[in-house]
Image: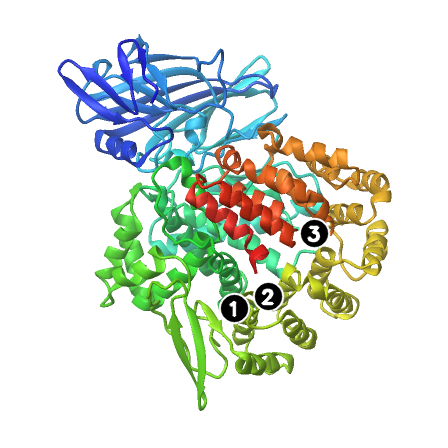
């Protein structure tokens, strides 16, 4: 333990600050511990932030900032602020502090500013800090920047109380280069031009959590549309007219989502405004900052070849982020162990919101397709986790995120609604929002409300589905024309998952059951036969059966040859685009690699002969991913060389970028030729920067590849995380996996750094990019060696490694 005496204050593992005869012991661990959060929640109220950032035109120049924080103290106690900037000057972090109007010296230690009680009073206090803004979560580029502070990254930008249950009002001002635009949570109230600079002032927000504070600044175009009393601005950097023509659809889906939620909840949109920014290279699909919601350009702007699945995904994303305005922003979880509550609401409501937007879609089928396969992908692995996980410190909150909270949770929510009834559920939701408006509430508090409206024991039901990991294994026996299900817990805990299962000849025919429906040889042969002979006429039954067959393939109960044979016989008769999309996605799985030539032939026949343009497009996307033979590579090269001559599929700009990457690996002697032609085709500087970043990873020259890999080990070269993940995935492409084995251990060794410096999904994305192309025993042994030697690895981070290496352990 390091003991240091500074200004007469003793710094220990806990920080003790004396005031006359009184002293308060404050938890002082790095990050935001649960103990510190509880201490502050009981001490502080009425928090307000006045923030100012002066943003220079040069990316390399520092951002000067001020923060004035006012708060009420329930008693005269010491106060701890969180601050973790990414810089030091001569080993120190410089700042100037004024407390209640007087300049004071305070201690900075272990990511915290400690303010002694002797400088404070019971009641209202103010702390003004002049500082240099931290940039870890500022996502700064040459002509733009945006904040992304979820889950605990507000403290990397400015001093604050960085925990979700200390909501505050924010008043922001920005000084930006002339010619830039800016958008923030509040409305712009005024602006002043000062030489080559502009100051923009924004209105005070409603009470929000620190992770939702947001602003975007840079060279953006703006388009506005008003309907009734609402006005929405879209900030973007897109120049392709085929993409900017999609704004009307985007506006329609935002306004439609708002209208649906207002009607369902009985509460008007609870914030000052709803603007969005569409950001190139954004890390996620979207982020629900009220008033300044961020979206990825890859999801919002669709290519001409877009499928119905891609159109649905965009609509669901917009509905998801809009649902967060009520569920997550208006009412927020008190701690990030319950972050899944906001995600389950957003995903479950999104599935409801998009239904009237796509009246021709079977939305029960879409729900099954959207959530079950993705949930099974993690729940079947050794790295499965409960929906609700234990969290001791917010510096590990990013590890809570994954397929379980985004995909299993909506499945569980659907079961809950069916259990309590839709009308009781709606009444409970309205009471939940009314009772906890602009405040915080946990899952258990919601269950308490719903329990009062139901005769069911929801607490016990919730305990198994929410607080335990894994899924049931369900064996199937026939008795006459009925099915008998027997449930078991594969982890030996004796758990029983309360759910209704239909008794028909095809197991789980309605797709409502969750778990592995184990098929023995006799039943699997019967089910495979039904699929092959086009005997499953109902869409939901057919998709549920295909999902279950694939899970039995993963579990080793049926063979890859059986699966491919049945799919090959059946697929030509499939008419539903959602099912077709799921099947061709399965055909790209590494578990079927030994059958790649058969799958190539199947997909090319669809590309060549299907009368359905969407099916041809989906088959083509899968064909690019699985093409292995010289013949398939030659076809792809011809299509890439002269896309205007290929009439079977509309090949978009991103399709051509992906083709160029894949072809550079297959034709290393044409590396420079492919690069020069493809780069000349690209529209927009952002796409050229992306291409220039990723393409060197495809080089056949080892020193070039090594240089790319080594650059990715440095934080500053991972600033645009989707680009970094793409480069890593191409370095570890399945066709060259033997030569990239040497990268695995070095990339695993920095996984803790990836978690500390990256955004919430980046650890999983990094691991997926690293390991997804590998299938060898050697790769499996390297991962096992890493896990054996790293017993100190955080348990949740170990789960991420196990999830993304599951395919190596089949």
Relative to 795, residue 540 above or below: below
**Residue 218 in the image, given as x and y percentages of width and height:** 59, 28
Residue at position x 42%, y 47% from top?
Answer: 324
Answer whether labels 1 and 2 touch (C-beta < 8 Å): yes
Query: Label 3, on which residue?
Result: 734
Relative to 27, residue 246 above or below: below
> For this rendering, which residue is in front, 505 or 609?
505
Query: Label 2, on which residue?
Result: 578
Answer whether labels 3 and 2 touch (C-beta < 8 Å): no
Q: Nearer the viewer, mark 1 or mark 3?
A: 3
* Sequence-first disc among 1 and 3: 1
Kindly tell me whether residue 240 is visible in this rendering: yes
**Residue 140 in the image, given as x and y percentages of width and height:** 57, 27
Real-space Cα separation, disc 3 to disc 2, in angstroms: 27 Å
Q: Secondary structure at mark 1?
A: helix
Residue at position x 31%, y 51% from top?
Answer: 443
> For this rendering, which residue is in front, 113 or 296?
113
């Amino acid at each position: 333990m390091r003991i240091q005496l500074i200004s007469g204050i003793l710094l220990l593992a806990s920080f003790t600050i004396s005031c006359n005869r009184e002293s308060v012991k404050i938890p002082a661990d790095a990050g935001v511990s649960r103990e510190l959060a509880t201490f502050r929640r009981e001490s502080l109220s009425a928090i307000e932030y006045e923030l100012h950032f002066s943003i220079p035109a040069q990316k390399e120049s520092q951002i000067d900032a001020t923060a004035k924080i006012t708060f009420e103290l329930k008693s005269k106690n010491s106060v701890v602020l969180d601050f973790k900037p990414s810089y030091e000057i001569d080993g120190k972090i410089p700042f100037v502090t004024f407390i209640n109007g007087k300049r004071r010296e305070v201690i900075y230690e272990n990511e915290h500013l400690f303010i002694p009680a002797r400088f404070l009073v019971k009641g209202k206090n103010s702390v003004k800090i002049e500082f240099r803004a931290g940039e870890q979560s500022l996502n700064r580029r040459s002509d733009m920047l945006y904040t992304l502070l979820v889950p605990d990254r507000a403290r990397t930008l400015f001093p604050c109380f960085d925990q979700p249950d200390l909501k505050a009002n924010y008043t922001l001002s920005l000084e930006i280069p002339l010619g830039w635009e800016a958008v923030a949570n509040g409305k712009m109230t005024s602006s002043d031009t000062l030489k080559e600079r502009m100051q923009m002032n924004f209105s005070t927000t409603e009470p929000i959590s620190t992770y939702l504070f947001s602003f975007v600044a840079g060279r953006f175009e703006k388009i506005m549309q008003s309907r009734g009393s609402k006005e929405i601005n879209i900030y973007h950097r897109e120049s392709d007219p085929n993409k900017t023509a999609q704004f009307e659809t985007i506006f329609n889906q935002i306004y439609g989502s708002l209208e649906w939620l207002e009607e369902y909840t009985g509460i008007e949109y609870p914030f000052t405004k709803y603007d969005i920014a569409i950001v190139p290279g954004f890390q996620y699909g979207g982020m629900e900052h009220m008033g300044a919601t961020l979206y990825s350009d890859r999801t919002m702007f669709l290519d001409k070849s877009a499928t119905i699945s891609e159109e649905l995904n965009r609509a669901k994303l917009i509905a998801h982020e809009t649902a967060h305005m009520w569920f997550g922003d208006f009412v927020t979880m008190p701690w990030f162990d319950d972050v899944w509550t906001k995600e389950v609401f957003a995903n479950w409501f999104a599935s409801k919101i998009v239904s009237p937007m796509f009246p021709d879609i079977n939305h029960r089928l879409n729900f099954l397709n959207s959530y079950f396969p993705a949930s099974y992908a993690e729940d079947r692995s050794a790295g499965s986790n409960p929906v609700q996980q234990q969290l001791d410190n917010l510096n590990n909150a990013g590890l809570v995120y994954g397929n379980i909270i985004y995909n299993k949770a909506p499945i569980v929510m659907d079961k809950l609604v069916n259990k309590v009834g839709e009308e009781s559920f709606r009444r409970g939701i309205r009471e939940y929002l009314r009772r906890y408006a602009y405040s915080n509430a946990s899952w258990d508090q919601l269950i308490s409300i719903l329990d009062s409206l139901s005769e069911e024991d929801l607490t016990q039901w919730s305990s198994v589905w929410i607080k335990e990991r894994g899924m049931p294994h369900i064996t199937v026996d026939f008795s006459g024309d009925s099915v008998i299900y027997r449930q078991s817990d594969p982890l030996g805990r004796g758990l029983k998952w309360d759910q209704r299962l239909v008794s028909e000849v095809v197991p789980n025919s309605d797709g409502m059951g969750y778990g592995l429906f184990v098929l023995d040889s006799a039943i699997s042969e019967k089910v495979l036969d039904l699929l092959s002979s086009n005997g499953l006429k109902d869409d939901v039954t057919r998709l549920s059966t295909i999902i279950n067959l694939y899970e039995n393939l993963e579990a080793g109960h049926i063979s890859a040859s059986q699966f491919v044979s049945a799919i090959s016989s059946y697929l030509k008769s499939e008419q539903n685009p959602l099912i077709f999309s799921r099947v061709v996605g399965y055909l790209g799985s590494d578990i079927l690699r030994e059958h790649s030539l058969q799958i190539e032939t199947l997909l090319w026949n669809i590309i060549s002969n299907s009368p359905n343009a969407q099916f041809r497009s989906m088959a083509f996307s899968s064909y690019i991913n699985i093409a292995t033979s010289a013949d398939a590579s030659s076809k792809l090269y011809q299509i890439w060389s002269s896309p205007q001559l290929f009439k079977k599929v509309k090949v978009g700009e991103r399709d051509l970028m992906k083709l160029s990457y894949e072809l550079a690996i297959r034709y290393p002697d044409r590396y420079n030729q492919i690069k020069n032609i493809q780069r000349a085709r690209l529209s927009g500087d952002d796409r050229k920067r992306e291409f220039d970043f990723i393409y060197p990873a495809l080089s056949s020259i080892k020193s070039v590849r090594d240089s790319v890999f080594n650059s990715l080990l440095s934080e500053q070269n991972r600033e645009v995380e989707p680009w970094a993940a793409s480069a890593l995935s191409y370095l570890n492409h399945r066709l060259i996996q033997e030569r990239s084995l040497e990268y695995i251990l070095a990339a695993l060794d920095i996984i803790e750094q990836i978690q500390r410096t990256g955004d919430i999904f980046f650890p999983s994305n990094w691991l997926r990019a690293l390991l997804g192309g590998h299938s060898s025993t050697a790769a499996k042994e390297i991962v096992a060696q890493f896990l054996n030697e790293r017993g100190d690895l955080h348990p949740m981070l170990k789960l991420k490694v196990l999830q993304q290496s599951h395919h190596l352990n089949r």
